[in-house]
Image (tube, rainbow, N blue to C red):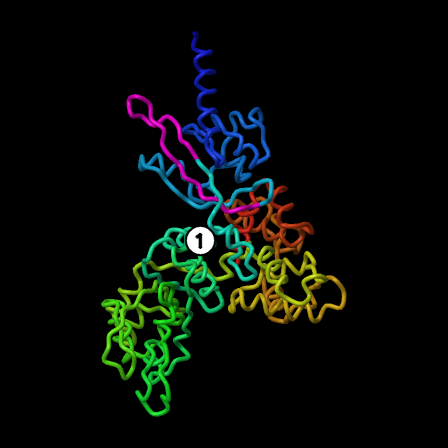
Amino acid sequence: MDTTSATVFNRHQVVGVLDSLNDPAVLLSTDLSILASNREYRAQFGESAATLAGRHCFEVSHRYTRPCDEEGETCPVQECAASGQPCRTLHVHHTQNGPEHHEVCTYPVRDEDGQVTSFLEIISPSAFDALSRNRERLVGHSQPFNRMLEMVRRVAPTNTTTLLLGESGTGKELVARAIHKLSTRANRTFVPVECSGLSESLFESELFGHEKGAFTGAIQGKMGLVEAAEGGTLFLDEVGDIPVAQQVKLLRLIETGVYRRVGSVTERRANFRLVCATHRTLEDHVREGLFRADLYYRISAFPIHLPPLRDRLEDIPLLAEHLKSRLACQNRCRLHGETLRLLQRYDYPGNVRELLNILERACLLADGETILPQHLPETCLRRAEQEDPIPAVLGEGESGGLPCGEIVPLTELEECYLRQVAQKFSGTNRELAEKLGISERTLYRKLSSLR
């Protein structure tokens, strides 16, 4: 058998092995070229073996013109090559059904001398797809959002105490519920506790319960929230607002796993998974004596930062459609292109909650089937008016552009040009990205940096 025949035979063997896998799988070279793929992979991305041969994985799955790491994402092949160990990450792929979250597992393939010669990637549906049918769910495809989902995916199957950090309105309770639903405790109770609404006198009774006659007005015994969360998840929202005097009682519960009802001498054993959340900077509270250091270290075993909406403006179109589905106007109101552009220029101090309020108000003001710019609140319109005038790239009379003939840094030239075309272009951001020869995500990131 000559070398060519042996190569063909080995390729057929590899394809046969890949086809034995239930999930989409692909064999990649060290330069990210596709060497072989299975039927599921080709069906996932609507390609044939002939059209895939020699192409790069990022072209097929992401529609990028360059590797993932140059687009701001994690390249699992590069991480796998650097460590020599399997790598697992969360990516958004463009499939036959549109953008979808996938879990990508990458394995190094070695020759008989132990040298890595290629990489096996197995792509499986993300656990988040199981939550996609929920009316209140996590929605987004931006890189900051995906990094947060990756952290959720890592911690959810464990019992590790998790601390969610983010501004008000970023969806901390939704993330906590997602952690619960993706955990081994999903079939048990999820118990949310709003700590900022509990006074010092009520905290212990609400959390641990009380016996009949424990205090004035306790005419009967009451189960506490810790007991209600038995076997499930206890979510302490705004944990930074717990009175200092009561923090030691929470600390003892976490350290020992036991508690007593108010008025009782009998210890009860607790069995729950703890997720905490706060919009405060707890490190500052610790330094100021407002939060116990020992409690902080107990609850911050696995911190997850939730990005504010202004850091993921590229998710606005997807979020807007999802949020509109929760409103009474869902069947008749669509967003005008200029309205959507205005929404993507706003800072959202109230985050996703504020976007929902803006859309609800706009739906009520719209008499027709389209939400127009005039239906947005003045804060959104003023934000657009306050943006710097967009000059021509090169000087054109009194247009304020860069002087002709003057040498300027390329970054300044690019920023000036982007400001100009973003204002004058009347199509969608996807169409503009195609004309500029970059991905839509890259365009969003560049436009966001201009702000």
Point out residue 285 in the picture as x, y percentages from the top left corner. 31, 72
Three-letter amino acid code of the residue under disc 1? Leu
Q: Is residue 19 above or below residue 222?
A: above
Residue sitting farthest toward the bottom: 216
Assess whether residue 79 is covered by the magenta stretch: no
Residue at screen point 32% across, 89% down = 213
Image position of 366 (left or right of 291): right
Residue at screen point 57% across, 41% down = 95
Residue at screen point 36% across, 37% down = 80
Q: Is residue 196 above or below residue 281?
A: below
Report the magenta residues as a range.
99-121
Element class at badge 1:
helix
Q: Is residue 364 above or below residue 314?
A: below
Label 1 sits on residue: 149
Point out residue 254 in the picture as x, y percentages from the top left corner. 27, 67
Point out residue 157 in the picture as x, y percentages from the top left corner. 37, 53
Question: In what quadrant of the picture does the N terminus appear?
Answer: top left
Q: Nearer the viewer, residue 33 or 288?
A: 33
